[in-house]
Image (tube, grey):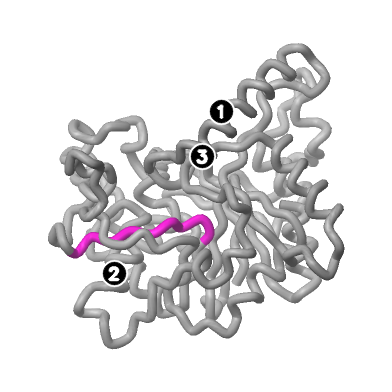
Amino acid sequence: MVLAQQQLAARGIPFFVNYLIGDSEHATCPSRQSAVCKRSQVKTLGSTCSGLDMLRTELGNSTVWCVDPRDHKAIWPNLARDLSTFAATHRVSFPKPSAIAGIHWAWLLCDAHAIVGAYRNLHRMPDHLWVFDYDITWVGDLSSFITAFDSNPADLLVAKDDGQAIARCNARGDVTYAQWQIRNYLKDDEVWSSLLAPVRYSRRMVEAMRELIGEGKLAFCETRGPSLCRHSSNAGWCRGPVSMQKLRPDLFNRNFSCCKSFSERYSRERWAIWKSLPAATRPPCQLLHRVKVDEHAPGTAAAAGAEANRARQERHSVKSGSSDGGGPSTGVCKKQAG
């Protein structure tokens, strides 16, 4: 995130981190006068540093948007009521019930938290709002990725356009995309989905989604925008979804995926490979998703064993592919540039 901040600032692109606090209606963000907390302090025995403290110290208070249920209510006064009704219908049948609760529903509100942060912290919505999952990493200059799409007029620019959700079936004809059911509106043939890691929304797309959620129309986050944009009632204004991977495959690591996991070591290896290439031939930037924190400290036997196991899993995943395990991570930090 520090690197993202530096690279985007060099091109004049505002950068913010969205941090979600709590899930009860009484949860509140702490004041900005939080403790000084460097990264080196976080794992110190007895340290009281929080993740939010660390982000504010390393990136600056103005860069970190802390959002809580009060912020959501200010944008959508009836959201808690709508979510409560929605959850009562879907918790029983959904294959991962732990993903279904209140506003921390990452699979339902992943991009909505970023929209709340933007409305609550910006004086004016930018022409385009980019939202990056926190578990994306990259090689090269992140600003060159964003500016590569400056001339594209799409209202909805997605990592990958997956198409009509209900049409995705296995060899037996079973629907393999369970998330299409997570909705309280839309006919079956009106459900479309896209990979939103990352995603770019136009100002009017953000406003349309704000209105949609305000009306109590809820859906899995990776179907909400694409279904809204493709709906017949919006055919006159919505341009998209447009796939970034289709437009610029060179800007994505060949293993970029919704659901495969890679280690931090793998990410560092990508940097080493990228740096070894001649500057004239290497891509200006390439994204990788999703990168998980290494579980053990480097240099230990446990770390070596864990890394070997991850490497085997990654090789197997690359060979065999991966079914859709369900959209964005449940993490709360989002990288955004407007």
Instruction: Report, in whole angstroms, how far the alpha carbon at label 2 lies from the one at label 1.
Output: 36 Å
Q: Nearer the viewer, residue 120 or 189?
A: 189
Residue drawn at (62%, 67%), measured in percent from left and top? Answer: 337
Q: Is residue 332 above or below residue 8?
A: above
- Please state if 33 lies on the left or on the right of 200 as rendered: right
Q: Which residue is mark 3?
A: 260
Under mark 2, the amino acid is Leu
Which residue is at the far bottom? 236
Q: Which residue is mark 2?
A: 228
Q: Position of residue 51 (x, y in %)?
A: 66, 38
Q: Which residue is mark 1?
A: 313
Kind of element beneath mark 2: helix
Quarter of the image for residue 233 reads bottom left
Frontmost of labels 2 and 1 is 1
Under mark 1, the amino acid is Gln
Q: Position of residue 229 (x, y in %)?
A: 31, 73
Instruction: Report, in whole angstroms, how far the alpha carbon at label 3 lies from the one at label 2.
Output: 27 Å
Frontmost of labels 3 and 2 is 3
Residue drawn at (66%, 19%), measured in percent from left and top? Answer: 306
User: Counting residues from the N terminus, which is met first, the one under dot 3 or under dot 2?
Assistant: 2
Instruction: Report, in whole angstroms, how far the alpha carbon at label 1 lies from the one at label 3.
Output: 9 Å
Main SS category, magenta section:
strand
Kind of element beneath mark 1: helix
Residue drawn at (83%, 19%), measured in percent from left and top? Answer: 299
CA neighbours of label 2 inside 10 A, class few (<14), some (14 to 19), many (20+): many
User: Counting residues from the N terminus, which is met first, the one under dot 2 or under dot 1?
Assistant: 2
Kind of element beneath mark 3: loop
Q: Position of residue 197 (x, y in %)?
A: 51, 55
Residue range (magenta): 190-198
- Cβ atoms at labels 2 and 1 below 8 Å apart: no
